[in-house]
Amino acid sequence: MFRAMRLLLSAAKSGAAGRASSGSSRLLSASPGSGRLAGKVAIITGAASGIGKATAAEFVKNGAKVIIADLQDDLGHAVAAELGGPDMAFYARCDVTNEAQVAAAVDLAVARHGHLDVMFNNAGIIGGTYMGGPIESMDMADFDRVMAVNLRGVATGIKHAARAMVPRSQGCILCTASTAGVLGGSAPHAYSVSKTAVVGMVRSAAAELAARGVRVNAISPYGIATSMGTRAVREMLGLPLVGAGAGDEEAVRRVFEEDFNEMGGGVVLRAEDVARAAVFLASDDARYITGHNLMVDGGFSVGKPLNVPVH
Ligand SMILES: NC(=O)c1ccc[n+]([C@@H]2O[C@H](COP(=O)([O-])OP(=O)(O)OC[C@H]3O[C@@H](n4cnc5c(N)ncnc54)[C@H](O)[C@@H]3O)[C@@H](O)[C@H]2O)c1
């Protein structure tokens, strides 16, 4: 009996050692340049700037080849060059409101690299002015524009990515939503609704595509000081959009780092945090995760303090 127990203990120990060593090698494999996305081919829309640009950098660092799809040609070409040039990162002009251009971006990825593994539908706009005014004066043309980019653009990206991924029974589609899609009152109506609908689109597509081997997930960041985020905060503070003085910069910085910030310990949300969440979801570590909306918000959306003074 003692011998049996000793055998059990030693088996348990070697199992733990095995798990520990695979844990440490996983830590190593998560370090920059180690290839969690090695061999994968990705398209990232809105990758000339902000979250998309940071994600393109993180993807390349992790071994992926990336198509930078955007409308800002100069910035897009510059990002592609910065990330190592056409073999690693290639810029393609792609307006996500134009289905033919989205289809062409997918075809380009397949033509250059033979397949498409990851489609990150990230391009988005906030629309008119940040707080947009009362609902009675909602600008319906602006509403349509925001929906065309944020929702229809995502739906189009899912459609054409699925066309390339389903025949191989594998692939990962990511879509940028927002905390504004989960909570009302923090963004203009059109933006908020478009992001709620992105999560609906993700669930609907994930439900269909799981059985065909393709995963679909959303990522919902809180406020980040990208060009979109900074513009929104400037409008909130009543600051000019350009030509700001140093005092203005400081006021904007305080909003992102203090007023918006939910996380203690000096941690401030950056585009790179979203990029790393995207690497995880795009990697094989997330191979059974689909239909999920990953909040990258430091807990902003999980609670609201009671409006009751505590005695
Ligand atoms: N910054 C934030 O606080 C924040 C928070 C939550 C969600 N988001 C979302 O993150 C995504 C990226 O935004 P960001 O903060 O990096 O802003 P950003 O303005 O830096 O980047 C957006 C990019 O999308 C591109 N784009 C806009 N319309 C396009 C179109 N029709 N076709 C192709 N590309 C287009 C722009 O040219 C730009 O490069 C958006 O979907 C946004 O709604 C941002």
Image: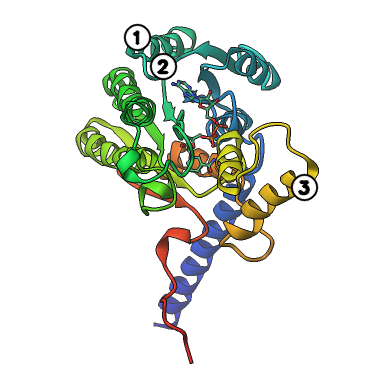
- Dot 1 beta carbon under 8 Å from ligand 1: no
Q: Is residue 59 above or below residue 4?
A: above
Q: Is residue 231 above or below residue 153?
A: below
> Residue 290: in sight, yes or no?
no
Q: Estimate the x, y position of residue 288 in percent, counting from the top left.
A: 34, 44
> Residue 121: in sight, yes or no?
yes
Please state the total of marks drawn on the protein image.
Answer: 3
Q: Secondary structure under badge 3?
A: helix
Which residue in the protein does label 2 denote? 115
Which residue in the protein does label 1 denote? 100
Q: Is residue 74 left or right of residue 101?
A: right
Residue drawn at x 40%, y 41% is 177
Q: Name the one closer to the observer, 131 or 158.
A: 131
Q: Secondary structure under badge 1?
A: helix
Q: Is residue 189 above or below residue 297?
A: above
Q: Name the one closer to the observer, 10 or 100.
A: 100
What scheme was used to colour the molecule? rainbow
Which disc is residue 247 wearing?
3
Q: Name the one closer to the observer, 122 or 213.
A: 122
Q: Name the one closer to the observer, 47 or 116.
A: 47
Q: Give the Cα separation between the discs numbered 3 and 2.
A: 49 Å
* Residue that extends furthest to the bottom in the rendered view of this protein: 311
Q: Is residue 212 left or right of residue 89?
A: left
Q: Estimate the x, y position of residue 293 in percent, counting from the top left.
A: 37, 47
